[in-house]
Amino acid sequence: MNNDQKAKVIEQFSKNADSYVTSHSHAKGNDLQHIKKWLHPESNWKVLDIATGGGHVAKTLGPVVSQVFASDLTKTMLQNTASHLRNYENIFFILADAENLPFLDETFDAVTCRIAAHHFPKPEFFIKETSRVLKPEGKFLLIDNVVPEEEALADFMNRFEKLRDGSHANCLSPSEWNQLSSKYQLKELKRDVHKKTYPFKTWVQRTTESENDWKQVEDYILSGSHEALSYFSVRTEDNRIVSLEVDEMMSVYEKR
């Protein structure tokens, strides 16, 4: 990863390690219940969970596969997650950069990455590395926020995400993810893009330092075009944002 971006990610996730274990959107997201249905994991599988964060995917797959390697760039985050999952004897915790994985070629039956790829400054490196460590016919499950295909709306979303969270790099669109994956022998088998609602106050306070910081985020969003406010379903009361919606994509690929 770019060193400056890497430092921001480590700083952000070190100070908020436990909040990512407990946050509703990370710990209770509807996507978690679909992971096993989409991957069809087998009991002898070895799985890599990239940027494991609070370890929710590792916890979901641990009971049904042979081994899960839960990797993360941030040691404090990983240590905290390891403590929460200490009863899972087949989950192993590895410090690793998503763009430079410390594993041999064709090691894993499946690779997963959930709500994290928007922090990666070089998503192509991440996809290239994912493909490299996957066995032929191995599965890759990607879950992340995505921007609309329309450029102005995409720029608007990445701007407010960057204001809210200095460790944010870039959200890609579904077509951009598909192009990258195809380039590295990953064929998309299934995709779902759906709306995810964020209660504004909880969402913005998790990553900002002060009320002034999150007011900047709020003011920027409220300054958006009618099209933007409509697309992101920005709901207000008394001129304050109550909630908004972003697109989340869940896709599964197979290495060919």
Image (cartoon, rainbow, N blue to C red):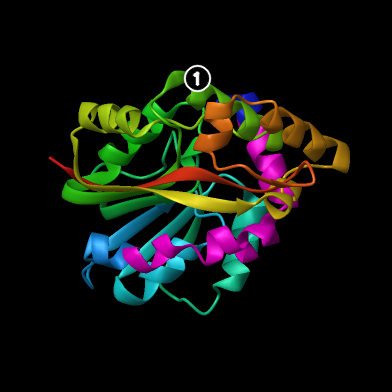
* Residue interval drawn in magenta: 6-34
Determine which quarter of the picture holds residue 149.
top left
Give the overall secondary structure of the magenta segment.
Answer: helix
Q: Is residue 30 magenta?
A: yes
Vertically, is 76 above or below 229?
Answer: below
Image coordinates for residue 166, horizontal then vertical, percent: 69, 33
Between 42 and 210, the residue placed more toward the observer is 210
Q: Quadrant of the C terminus?
A: top left
Q: Secondary structure at mark 1?
A: helix
Which residue is disc 1 drawn over? 152
Q: Residue furthest top?
A: 151
**Residue 94 visible in the picture:** yes
What's under tag 1, amino acid-wise? Ala
Between 91 and 127, the residue placed more toward the observer is 127
Image coordinates for residue 210, horizontal then vertical, percent: 86, 42
Vertically, is 64 above or below 213?
Answer: below
Q: Is residue 210 left or right of residue 208?
A: right
**Residue 1 visible in the picture:** no
Image coordinates for residue 253, horizontal then vertical, percent: 23, 45
Question: Is the residue marked by circle 1 packed among few (<14), some (14-19), or many (20+) residues within 10 Å?
Answer: few
Vertically, is 11 above or below 139?
Answer: above
Q: Is residue 126 magenta?
A: no
